[in-house]
Image: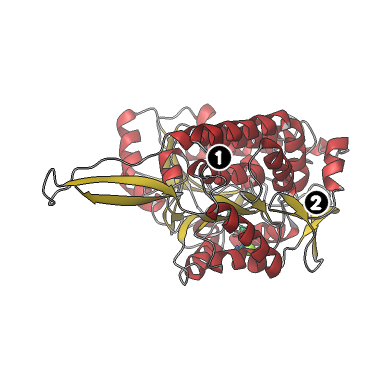
Amino acid sequence: MNDMTTVSYQQHAYSAAAQKSLSRKPALFINGEWVASSHGGLIDVEDPSSGKVVSQIVDASLADTDRAVAAARAAFDDGRWSGLAPIAREKIMLRLADLIEAHAEEFAELEAIDNGKPKTMAGAIDVPGAVSHIRYMAGFAAKVGGETTPPYTLPTGAFFTYTVKEPVGVCAQIVPWNFPLLMACLKIGPALAAGCTIILKPAEQTSLTALRLADLIAESGIPAGVVNVITGYGHVSGDRLVKHPDVDKVAFTGSTEIGKLINKNATDTLKHVTLELGGKSPVVVMPDVDVAEAAPGAAGAIFFNSGQVCVAGSRLYAHKSVFDQVVEGIANTAPFWAPRPSLDPSAHMGPLVSQEQFDRVMGYIEAGKRDGASVAMGGDAPSADGYYVNPTMLVNVNPQMSVVREEIFGPVVVAQRFDDLDEVVKEANNTQFGLAASVWTKDASTLHKLASRIKAGTVWANCHAMIDVALPFGGYKESGIGREQGRAGIEAYLETKSVIVKL
Ligand code: NAI
Ligand code: MG
């Protein structure tokens, strides 16, 4: 492990490929073409490792947004994508996956510059993940279909009845800044496989990889208008998409607050809505664990991606018999997780994405201290340009504190001790959220009891945040509506039509 005192906060030089992306003329990708905004408004792009403005993107206006919707609508209505043979759609999607893979290095660097995550992490997780989402979903293009189903009350032999699956239509896909390319591909993959058309809106903080992706979408052979990429603010272009009568579905990943607003705003046009929202996921450490394994595991559960992960293991519950050892084991990982600039090859954790997130996370840490929590690790920020926060653990907390109840979305874990299984199940479920949980135990019976009693869309055992595209992902309670990934993920982009034929 490195000595924390040697950390340098100087961002490394950008490659020529990255500089090319940063200096591209701000534009929107509509109907297969790069177009300027109708009103010329721009948004600054920052490198969170230095706090410097490094590029600009378009702030799409309402007129720009309408233009993108019109393009997606026309592309859907004339069947230029859904009308292709599934084998052709599959092939084109696989080509897109190959193209992303061929530019893996460039995508990893752009993501690091834009989001602040270590380039090594983006290269190991975000980019291969993005490729897998497109590849896996490509296979569904030919494998979704309805069924011939015998009628129950209609006379046998007098009717022929079957169902067909059809694409939902024009989809607005609004993604957040924590895994920009990965989220974009997670969203477009199933929509493309289903035959839908798309308006993708990346987060205003992190649009660079989505714009680069648009280049590859054009190159892959996906017809013009099938995927449109518009950059801009959520309350302007995002809001317009959600309310637009020509949009059939909204798929959103982001905060629970905005998810609730989107759900309301989509009501007047009764859109299909899938929401993947916030979490406050428990990490439950039972007394029988090997602390040498569980403590670094629990640390990774919260500090990976600077804690800016919807499934971050932000509430640690360790059995009283191992609590002190687990807390010590996590605190010992401080040098490993010490934040560094995203292009530093030794970085395991980068800065937070923005000043806004920095203020928010530091505000929670201060609130925790004010409420009486003690700092067992970190609790502060290095003095540097950029939005670095040291990995932080708070102890002596109670369930009423905001740091225990609310999603912080930063490298901050609250650690609590428990006596028995019933108590920890009650506390783990004592939250508005229900996205994920992990349980750490070698005892199979305890493991399955916990897996069954914890109310969450995903439960991991002896690991955390192991996400695989084949497995449905989504939340219970206020963590969301619907599932992405797996067969459930493609079903969310399909309508079912029943056909009843009198013979
Ligand atoms: P946000 O939920 O406001 O933004 C996510 C996306 O929604 C962005 O593309 C944004 O432009 C768009 N958006 C915002 N307002 C919209 C509206 N009215 N209509 C349509 N689209 C809209 O997240 P924000 O403000 O960047 O972060 C705030 C907090 O949200 C974070 O501190 C974190 O707690 C949570 N968050 C959770 C994420 C998750 O994966 N669960 C991801 C990002 C943020
Ligand atoms: Mg917001």
Q: Amino acid at mark 2?
A: Gly
Q: Amino acid at mark 1?
A: Ala
The residue beneath circle 1 is 301
Judge from the rendering whether residue 74 lies leftward or rightward of residue 14; answer left or right. Answer: left
Place of residue 401 in the rendered image (x, y in percent of width and height, measured from the top left): 51, 62
Counting other residues with Cα less than 10 Å from the Cα at mark 2, is it few (<14), some (14-19), or many (20 or more)?
Answer: many
Judge from the rendering whether residue 176 lies leftward or rightward of residue 191; answer left or right. Answer: right
Residue at position x 75%, y 63% in the image:
59
Please state, as top left, top right, bottom left or bottom right, where the N terminus lies in the image.
Answer: top right
The residue beneath circle 2 is 386
User: Residue 488's quadrant in the figure?
Assistant: top left
**Camera-side residue of 340 and 25:** 25
Residue at position x 60%, y 34% in the image:
92
Q: Is residue 248 above or below residue 154?
A: below
User: Residue 113's quadrant in the figure?
Assistant: top right
**Mark positioned earlier in the residue sequence (2 or 1):** 1
Total numbered labels: 2
